[in-house]
Amino acid sequence: MYNRAIYRFVCSETEPVVTTHAGKVRGYLVNDIYTFHGIRYAQAERFQMPRPVTWEGIADAQDYGYICPPTHDTEIFGDITAPHRYWLQSEHCQYLNIWTQELNPQAKKPVVVWLHGGGFVSGSAIELECYDGENMARYGDVVCVSLNHRLNILGYLDLSDYGEEYANSGIVGMEDIVMALKWVRDNIDQFGGDPDNVTIMGESGGGAKVRALLQMSSADGLYHRAIIQSGILPGNASITPEDEKREAKDTAHRIVEAIGGLDALLSAPYEELLRAMKKVEAERPIAWGSIPWTPVPLTGSYVGEWCNAGFRKETLSIPVIAGSVFCELARYTNLKDKSAMTEEERYEALVAEYGAEFAPQIRDAFRKAYPELNLYYASVVDTFVRRPTRQFAVERTAAGGADTYNFLFAHETRFKGGLMSTHADDLPFVFHNAEYIGAMFAGDQTYKAQDEIFYAFMAFARSGNPNHSGIPAWHPVTPQEPQCFIFSRKPSCRVDHDAELIRLAAAHATTCRGFAPPQPNHP
């Protein structure tokens, strides 16, 4: 990912070799970090539950494992803000990676298990260069784990009508993750980790996976804290888990018919599965323009979303951080230097976005909520993710969820004349890798913001409390006081600071604030 001075490298027949329940693995040591890439944690037949895997001898763990094939071709877009890596693909993609400072079973370091983004459709544990866990292990003094698992049609096609062996096919992608967590429980002490102190953490689709694990009893006891970054989207409480289950089964029946029967579905190359899927989509377009590959409610132990199935009482004692970034998926239309804009130009951006009638109200609400930020950013403030994330935190607390923390990441870079954080811009910071990505640069503020959010997340992984000496007090949410910690030039914990702004912006914005095809000027 970046240039580094190597003063020590070890990889021999005898070290570093670790004995796991599945067999021995050989990684390597670079400087002070032991690294193990591509450890196989499970195996599975198509559409069936994962099973443990074992091997004889010593398995080399020096190369990343296969990633799950996506449903679409990769695009070269936005690499300057989020450098990508592309890798070999296979539906047999149950591999994990580990970074640690010690191979001492007595070290008992906190464990952070990273779940990658890409919805439930695409992405991988190595897709973004900033997912590299070396610095998290070094500066956070934790054991960092990342993993691949089944996605899209391979992970979430509900074939339960076709036989008992497919009863859980609508959530086998999530059950892969559960199996990885079981592997961590059984083996992570050999890598210096504490199996009784595991934090699951993910952004976007990875945050949605964290959210789903909270709703699955099969994952209970395998993790102890949870961090959700930009992973809570608007839900529809009027659609019941039963409705979603019926829709998922109907979709499966159509795909089986389109490909020519169950036998063909089980044996066809992945490309043919995609053709059948696209045929079904074309015959009956579905919301969001594609089949909504997500965990199927009422499948296995998954009860459904918090917004229509309620919060499981068994996980309300789990400390949770849930937050988002300031602009998320808003489109920038003005790429000139924001600091050089006149006050009139900044206000004109609000008029263009909200209309002359509502611009004054939004200006006033923005200045009250974010006095430290450039007024221009009121024209691109996110409501699509921010509003349901706030709702999730408040309702979880009202349901009895202790230690629920909310945050908003508002970091302005010098890229393209100054851009406020958009979707996934917090990732390099929480991995302590921001200084290696030029488009994230904002002078000393880069390192300040990195230390503030990174050490907050690491403190949370250690104790369930994100407070540390480098930030003002961060208070948990209560129904009466919806606290939100703002990571900005003037970090602070604020109470219901943006309620009026979000209400007005959501009601009067003229551009799409949700998921939409990327635009050439969309960072």
Image (spheres, rainbow, N blue to C red):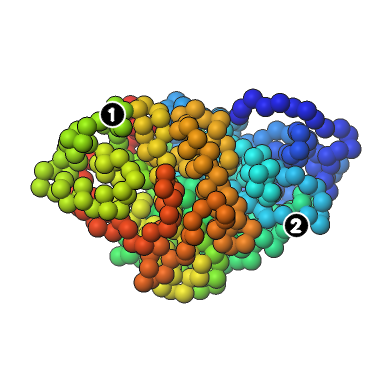
Residue 182, given in percent of the width and then of the height, sits at 68, 58
Q: Quadrant of residue 241?
A: bottom left
Asked if residue 514 lies left or right of residue 249, the reply is: left
Which amino acid, by three-letter code, is at mark 1?
A: Ala
Q: Camera-side residue: 471 or 506?
A: 471
> Going by the picture, which residue comes out furthest to the right?
14
Q: Is residue 44 left or right of residue 187?
A: left
Q: For residue 307, what is the image quadrant?
A: bottom left
The residue pinned by badge 1 equals 340
Q: Nearer the viewer, residue 375 or 110?
A: 375
Let me know if residue 324 appears in the view. no
Q: Which residue is mark 2?
A: 108
User: Residue 361: x and y, percent?
Assistant: 17, 51
Relative to 176, does residue 61 appear above or below in the rendering?
above
Q: Residue at x 17, y 35 (%)?
A: 344
Q: Are marks 2 and 1 in contact (CB under 8 Å)?
A: no
The spot of residue 181 in percent (x, y) is 65, 56
Q: Quadrant of the C terminus?
A: top left
Which of 89 and 499 lies nearest the eye of the viewer?
A: 499
Question: What's the distance in space between the residues labelled 2 and 1, CA to CA?
Answer: 51 Å
Secondary structure type for disc 2 = loop
Q: Residue, x 83% and y 48% (percent of image)?
A: 19
